[in-house]
Amino acid sequence: MNRSTRIAALTVFAAVLAAPALAQTVKVTPLGGIDGEFCPQDRALVFEDPNGTRILYDPGRTVAGGGDPRLGKIDIVLVSHMHGDHAGNAHNKAPNSGTCAAPDMSVSAMPNSNAANIAIAKKAKIVTGSEMPPFFAAKLKANGGDPADSMLARFGGSVTVGGVRIATVTAMHSNGLDPDYIGGDLGKAMKDAGIAGDVGLPTGFVLRFSNGLVAYLSGDTGITADQELVVRNHYQAKLAVMNIGDGFTTGPAEAAYVINELVKPAAVIASHANEVGTVGGKARPGSKTEAFVKASKVPVHLPLSGKTMEFDAAGKCTAGC
Ligand SMILES: [Zn+2]
């Protein structure tokens, strides 16, 4: 081999070595109310790391308990805060029961929560921030699970589970625990008085996957300075999952400001619209979902239930979008 042949051979060799890393993507699959649509109660997403670790984010009311056949293996359950539409105070009987406009939420998950029931069924870890871990540890213990499977990632720190680094970040919202999770005389007295249990602050999450992709999951939040100072400047998130529902969280205009001016990711997945966001898999004209798509400067991917999207380390959707 002369010198140029050797260099050419080395180049091919290097490309072969690099190819698997370049091809590694994080798969994101929404587990919403109706296949192929983005519906009012949809929050749940499954993230699959290239190494096979599977993470369920905010199961809410559209995952039909631990027996939902769409779940498959789940290693980690993330809960941003304790409100019923995130932890899951109730859920559908089965995927695609009810309609997009009128979701089935007929199965109670009280007093455990859908999140705790799924974690027990899947022998998964539950990772939360703030003061939520003792709550979930108690639910695991009371239902035959291992309380040590409830893990803490408090603001500023992180835990690594299954090769995925998990940190919690600021969410400006509320996090009162419905007294029905407490039950008994105490739960009843609290309910009669109109007060909720204290499990600390709500959170968002930042996940760093093994292919290098950093994703920001907003949880329920308003606009916060940390979206720039922490999520963008420190963690350098390239993919965002952003709540657009308004009233309870950022609406489409506020969410677009967060994306365009503060987090500046390469792409965003809309979430938590509290409306029929799509018809036939396309943004419904006049919807908040459509307004967010128009206002965002980066590609907006709609979380169509059951449709897997793949993202590379740079936050670019490489398949399924
Ligand atoms: Zn909430």
Image: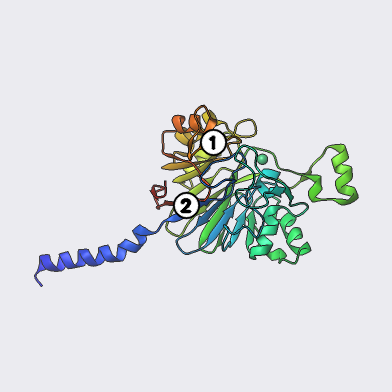
> For this rendering, which residue is in front, 61 or 8?
61
> Is residue 258 shown above or below 23?
above
Q: Position of residue 250 (x, y in %)?
A: 58, 33
Badge 2 is on which residue?
Answer: 308
Looking at the picture, which amino acid does disc 2 mark?
Answer: Thr
Task: Judge whether 96 appears above or below 272 on screen.
Answer: below
Res. 201 visible in picture: no
Residue 6's spot in the image, x, y percent?
A: 14, 69
Horizontal and vertical percent for residue 257?
Answer: 49, 31
Judged from the image, the quadrant occupied by ligand 1 is: top right
Q: Among all residues in the image, which is located at the extreme top?
A: 286
Residue 246 figure quarter:
top right
Mark 2 is surrounded, within 10 Å at the Cα level, by few (under 14), some (14 to 19) or many (20 or more) other residues, namely many
Of residues 275 and 258, the one nearer the viewer is 275
Q: Quadrant of the N terminus?
A: bottom left
In screen coordinates, is 93 left or right of 318?
A: right
Q: Secondary structure at mark 2?
A: loop
Q: Which residue is mark 1?
A: 277
Measured as percent of width and height from the top left, residue 310 is found at 43, 52
**For the residues marked 2 and 1, what is the alpha-carbon distance in whole angstroms?**
18 Å
